[in-house]
Every structure is written in C-alpha cells, then in structure tokens.
Amino acid sequence: MLYKIFADLIVVIHFVWILFMLLGFVLTICSTWAVYILRNTADVWSAFFDRWIFRTVHLGGIIYVAVLTILGEYCPLTILENELKGRHSPELTYRGSFVIHYIEKLVYPEADFLIFVIPTMIIAAFSIVMFAVRPPAKIKQLIDRLF
C-alpha cells in the first residue's frame, strides 16, 4: 500500500511540474507581449524578466524535458512511478483516489508522440531565446563579471 501512495504522490508532483513548465511559458509570452509589443513598462510585466530563480529553473527544466523528448527517453518521474506501481501489491482492491485517477489521465494522455514533441520544442526554443534576449538582472550581472 505504501508503494501505491508514493506512486500517487509522484503523479501529483509530475502534474505540478508540468503546470510549472506551462506557467513559465505563458508568463514569458505575456511578459514579452506586454513589454516588447505593447511597450508596456508596467512593473508587473517587466519585473517578471528579473525573477531569476523562477526563470532559470524553468529554462533548465524545459531544456531537460526537450533533451529527453529528442532522445525518446522517459522522464525520471515516470520511471519512478512505474517502478513504485510495479512493487505495489496486485491483491489490494483499493484502486486509488478519484483525483489521482484523473491527474494520471492529464499527465499521461493517449496521443500521438509528435503532439508532445513539437510543442515541447517550440516552448524550449522560445524560452531559450527569451532568456538570451532578456536575461534576469542577476544572471546578466554574473555574465558581465565573467566576460
């Protein structure tokens, strides 16, 4: 039963990670649109570009996801979840919670592989370009000191 609980926890963590990746992409698009297209220098949008921890973790994460996708490898969270589910006793009748059942369908939808590869590559390319065009202030200071 403990393996099932840990596997369900991994599914929730995986779902939160996916939301973080999508949220970072949406915030980057909105900030780019507001600052560069609309020329809106409101603190709300331009301040997003200086959220260096959020943007750096997001960029590293999306690059990692893109590399895994290109290589055709599974995410370590998927591997861990499958390992835990494999250790789960099949005799137990409890099949998991209602929420876990639907989160699994969101995290692991049945769709063509290209439906995931193409958006992942677009998100990764956009995130890399925006990080290069407008790096967070702390990262820019670090680069200026190094070079």
Image (cartoon, rainbow, N blue to C red):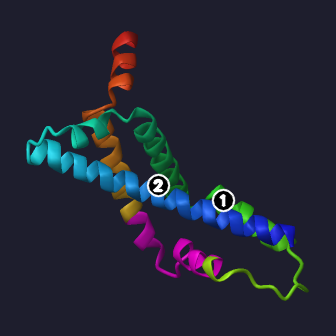
Residue nearest the viewer, comparing 98 with 6 = 98
Mark 2 Cα shell of 10 Å, populated few (<14), some (14-19), many (≥20)? some
Say if residue 71 shows up in the picture. yes
Label 2 near label 1: C-beta < 8 Å? no
Percent of width and height locating residue 109: 52, 78
Check disc 2 and report its element: helix, strand or loop.
helix
Figure quadrant of the C terminus: top left
Q: Is residue 110 left or right of residue 52?
A: right
- Name the residue furthest front: 43
Q: Is residue 2 magenta?
A: no
- Magenta segment boundaries in residue numbering: 100-118
Say if residue 73 shows up in the picture. no
Percent of width and height locating residue 90: 87, 83
Q: Which mark is residue 20?
A: 2
Q: Main secondary structure of the magenta part?
A: helix
- Name the residue furthest bottom: 93
* Residue at x-position 47% and y-position 53%: 66
Question: Which residue position holds label 1?
Answer: 77
Which comes sooner in the sequence, label 1 or label 2?
2
Q: Is residue 103 magenta?
A: yes
Percent of width and height locating residue 47: 27, 36
